[in-house]
Every structure is written in structure tokens, then in C-alpha cells.
Amino acid sequence: MIDFSNNANIEKLIKACIRGEKKYQKILYQSFYGKMLAVCMRYAADINEAQDILHDGYIKVFNKLKSFEYKGSFEGWIRRIIVNNAIDYVRNKRDFVISISDDNTFNNLKDNSFDNNDEQLIKMKAEIIIKLIQKLSPAYRTVFNMYVIEEYSHKEIAEELNISIGTSKSNFAKAKLKLKLLFEQYNIEKRD
């Protein structure tokens, strides 16, 4: 495997990929496949959709390799492309509808993830949490992921999705509420 903390190794890999050397393209693809699939799973409705998003994202990664400037993390650079591809994918789906509400409706809500009494949710396995997130509507799922996972501000989400800041906050609040309900339902079903 390649040591991705060494810029010389990254440069060698990138140049080989740009030249079209399949061996190195495969190494790049496989090196980040698991992590990037996990990113896509948070935006997708199922594994097949996540793989489609990932494959499209990797095409963009390979097409943009010439533009990598060897500043910052190579993995972070790849992740940003994959995340942007996932957001574009969800935004372009026909069933992606942003819930619009009065900008002032949710201004007083806490925006920092979940309340302190949600420790059980934090302790859940990642795969269960991902399955619960996948049950959210595409709009709620996207805003939730952008805010909580990708750490976008509501202003950045609003700009990226072409909505108001209040709508971003509203969708985030509704996503949190729906996730809490799904979590409660999951716990009830688990006990039965």
C-alpha cells in the first residue's frame, strides 16, 4: 500500500494515474473505497445508490487529478469531491424537495446535533445510524449530513442548495425530530 502521508508517494501515484496506468488507478480506487463508500451511504437511499454515487465521484476524482496542488490532505481532497458529487446527485433527483417554512420558525432551536439526553443514539453502531439516516427524505438527509457530518454552516447549506438559511434550519430540525422518532421505533422493535 501507498503511504499517503508522503507527498512524493502521492505525486508518483497521481502521475501514474494521469498516464492511465491501471495498476495505480486501482490502488487509488481501493485505498479510499471503504471510507468514501461510507460517505456516500449517508446520502444514498441504499447500497446500490451509494455505489453509483461513489463510482461517479471517482470518475470526477480521476478527471481532476491534474488539479491537485499537494496542499492539505489528499484523502480530504478526494472526500470533498465525493461529498460534492453526492450532494449534486441528491439535488438532481426528482424526489428531492426542500421543505420551505417561515425563516423565523426554527431560529430558537439548538443547532448542535442532538440534545444531551440522546446518549443512546451516540452509542449505536454506525451501520444502524446510517440505516436510520437513509430513511429520511432526500432533502432532510442531505441537510442533516451537510450540517452534522460535513460541518457546513446553515449559510453554506443555503448557498449550496439555493434555499434560505431558515429553510436549512427547518429541514435540519425536522430531520433531527424524524431521526429521534426512527430511533425510538428501532428500540421498540429491538425489544420485541
Image: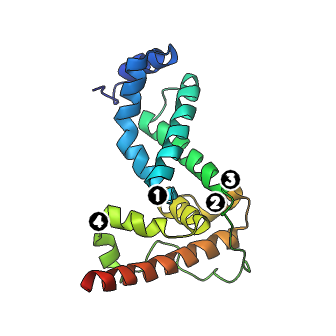
Instruction: Tell us which disc is closer to us: 3 or 4.
Output: 3
Q: Mark 4 and 2 residues: CB-CB less than 8 Å, in contact?
A: no
Q: Quadrant of residue 25?
A: top left
**Mark closer to the chain start, 2 or 3:** 3
The numbered dot on residue 46 is 1
- State how far apart marks 3 and 1 are (Cα): 17 Å
- 172 lies above or below 51: below
Residue drawn 34% across and 75% down?
121
**Which comes before the other along the chain, label 2 or label 1?**
1
Q: Amino acid at mark 4?
A: Lys
Residue 93 figure quarter: bottom right
Whole-angstrom CA distance, mark 2 to mark 1, is: 23 Å
Residue at the spot of label 3: 92
In depth, the one of 108 and 186 nearer the eye is 186
Please tell me whether mark 2 sits on a helix, a strand or a loop.
helix
Measure how far apart labels 3 and 4 are at the Cα level: 30 Å
**Of the residues tagged 2 and 1, which is closer to the observer?**
1
Name the quadrant containing residue 34. Answer: top left
- Visible in this render: residue 73? no
User: Disc 2 marks which residue?
Assistant: 157
| Residue 112 appears in the rendering | yes
Earlier residue among tags 3 and 4: 3
Question: How far, Cα to Cα, is label 4 from label 1?
Answer: 17 Å
Check the image and name the residue furthest to the left.
191
